[in-house]
Image (cartoon, helix red, strand yellow):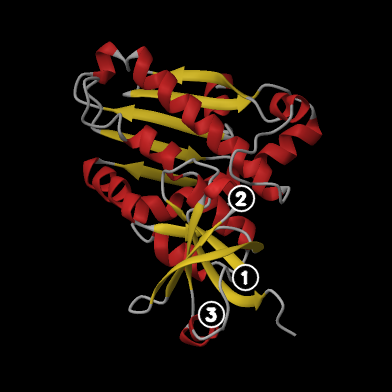
Amino acid sequence: MKQREKYENALLTIRFIGEDIDEQGVSIYDFASSLLSLQRIVNKAHLSIEGRLRKGAFPDKQARTRISLSIGERRRTSDAFALIPLLTDSTTLEYLKKIADYVASGLVGYCVGDVMKRIRGENDEDKQQFIGAIHADVVNIVNRIDAAGGIAKIEIGAPNQSKPLLIEFDEGKKDYINGLANEYYLGRNQTIEGGVYRLYPNSLIVTIRRPRGRKVNIFLSQENFDKIRYNQGDELQVKFRGRPRYKFGIESLTITDFEADNIKIEGEI
C-alpha cells in the first residue's frame, strides 16, 4: 500500500507503453532523454512562474536543487515511473505541486492539438512564453515514440492535483508536434532599434541592421510602414516597440523577426 500511495501521490508520472516494454522495459537512452526533457520543462515552469523565463535563462544553483525531481517508484505496467521532489520539506512540496500543475497545463495543448490557439488566446505573457518555450523539450520526448526502443505511446500524468491529469502522446500527436516547427510565438514586449536597410512593400516588412551587422525583419502595420517608407533622409534610424517572433524549437538568443506595434523615427518630434 505504501508503494501505491507513492505512485498515486507523485508530482508527475511518466509511462512508456509498447508491445514488449512490459517484459524488457524502456531503454536507458529513451528513459534518460525523456526525464532530462521533463526536468527542463519543470525548470522553465519555475522561471515562468517567477516571471524570469527568457531565451537562455536557467535557474540558479539553489533553485535547481529546490525543483529537482527524483524517481520515487518504478512500476512494470508497461514501464511507469513516479517522479517526486528531491527535497521533502513542506514548503518545497507545495511549490512543486504548483509547478506540476503549471507543467501539465502547458502540455495539454500539445496533446489535444491546439497549441497555437492556446498561445494566442492566453492573456498571461509568462504562460504564453512557457507554452512556446517547451516545444523543443516536448519534441525530444515524443521522438522516443516509434523509434528503436519499441515505444508506441508515452503518458505523462499529474496525479497529485485537485483534478488529476493524464496526457497521452502517440505517433499521430508526435507528427503534429514536430509539424509546429513552422509556427512561431511572440516573445516579451521590448524595444529594439537599428538603421533601415531594406523595405518590402508587399509584405509590410522593414529589414534593419543592428549592432555588429545583425539583421532583423520588422513586421509592421500599413500605417507604420508608410511612416518609414515616406520619411526623408538616408541611414534612417528607428526604434521599434513590440515583441520578437520566435520559431518553435529554436533555442537561439538572436532575434531575427520582430512584430512592432509602435515606432519612433530618430529626430522626429
Of residues 38 and 260, the one drawn nearer to the viewer in this rendering = 260
Per the model, the C-alpha gap separating discs 1 and 3 is: 8 Å
Q: State the SS at label 2.
A: helix
Q: Amino acid at mark 3?
A: Ile
Where 225 falls versus 153 (above or below)? below
Question: Alpha-carbon neighbours of circle 3 within 10 Å: few (<14), some, or many (≥20)?
Answer: some
Q: Please indicate, yes or no, whether residue 225 appears anywhere in the rendered image.
A: yes
Residue assigned mark 3: 228
Of residues 30 and 163, the one drawn nearer to the viewer in this rendering = 30
Residue beneath the point at 28% across and 50% down: 179
For the residues bearing labels 2 and 1, Cβ distance under 8 angstroms: no
Residue assigned mark 1: 238
Q: Earlier in the sequence, mark 2 or mark 1?
A: 2
User: Which image quarter holds the C terminus?
Assistant: bottom right
Where 9 falls versus 65 (above or below)? below
**Quarter of image, res 168:** top left
Q: Amino acid at mark 1?
A: Val
Pinpoint residue 145: horizontal percent, then vertical percent. Answer: 26, 32
Residue beneath the point at 71% across and 51% down: 51
Relative side of 200 to 173, left or right: right
Per the model, the C-alpha gap separating discs 2 and 3 is: 20 Å
Relative side of 268 to 231, left or right: right
Q: Amino acid at mark 2?
A: Pro
Relative side of 74 to 28, left or right: right
Mark identifier at residue 211: 2
Q: State the SS at label 1.
A: strand
User: Which image quarter holds the N terminus?
Assistant: top right
Q: Earlier in the sequence, mark 2 or mark 3?
A: 2
For the residues bearing labels 1 and 3, Cβ distance under 8 angstroms: yes
Per the model, the C-alpha gap separating discs 2 and 1 is: 13 Å
Q: Residue furthest front?
A: 234
